[in-house]
Amino acid sequence: LANGGISVRAMAQGSSEHNVSVVVDSKHESRALRTAHSAFYLSDQTLSIGIIGSGVVGSALIRQILHQRKSLKERMGVDLRVTGLTTSKKMSLSTDIESDDWLNTESVLDADLDAFAAHVNDPSLPNAVIVDCTASEVVTEKYEEWLNKGIHIVTPNKKANSGPYPTYLALRQAMSSA
């Protein structure tokens, strides 16, 4: 549960030592259950994925996820949900985006990285991943904050690791604490 960012209020072990009971805040109930089930593989491994950038890499990733996710769920129990897509100007937020034509839908909003990350890091989904397919320093400035909130980051963006050394160290510290 700690790996899922969930605080345990109380814990008890049964006398037979075959069961453990925990008490968590009701607002974390769903996430706690999914995190526990994921740890024992009693449910699909669900990932809430947010993709930043719709260029060559971002577009190819979106198409690949849409093409492979049914097979991944059936064969490996991995449930990929693209819950957010954003560019520097526009974003789309959903429970699961199912089209690579997301920029032409009515649900497109003005881009806001904070709102985007909050949506992707939905407490009802145990694992949040942001894939940064940009070369933007503005996006890399959010990495430490996202890592500290338990969001995983995948990126080919070199800006974060080639900037000021204190920034590099802060990111490494945030990654090791996550």
Image (cartoon, rainbow, N blue to C red):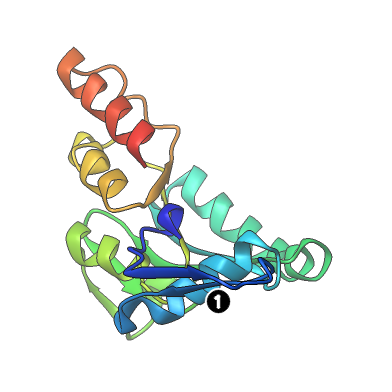
Decide if residue 94 is in sight here: no
Q: How many marks?
A: 1
Give how far across and how far down residue 94 sits, in percent. 40, 79
Q: Residue furthest right?
A: 75
Would you identify the image quadrant in which residue 91 lies? bottom left
Quarter of the image for residue 15 reads: bottom right
Q: Nearer the viewer, residue 89 or 140?
A: 140
4 shown above or below 165: below
Residue 12 placed where, x, y %? 48, 70
Please say whether residue 63 is visible from this viewpoint.
yes
Q: Is residue 10 left or right of residue 18?
A: left
Of 169 and 114, the residue lying toward us: 169
Q: Is residue 107 left or right of residue 42?
A: left
Residue 107 point in image, percent of width and height: 32, 83
Residue reaching furthest to the top: 165
Can you give x and y, in whole percent of width and height, for residue 97 in the image? 49, 75
Q: Which amino acid, by three-letter code, is at mark 1? A: Glu
Q: Is residue 74 left or right of residue 118?
A: right
Residue assigned mark 1:
98
What residue lies at 70% left-to-right and 72% top-to-bottom?
Answer: 42
Name the residue at 56% across, 52% down: 61
- Name the residue: 32% across, 63% down: 7
Task: Locate the C terminus and report the quarter of the image it occupies.
Answer: top left
Residue at 30% x, 78% y is 25
In the image, 50 versus 128, the foreground residue is: 128
Q: Secondary structure at mark 1?
A: loop
Label 1: few (<14), some (14–19) or many (≥20) C-alpha neighbours in 10 Å: some
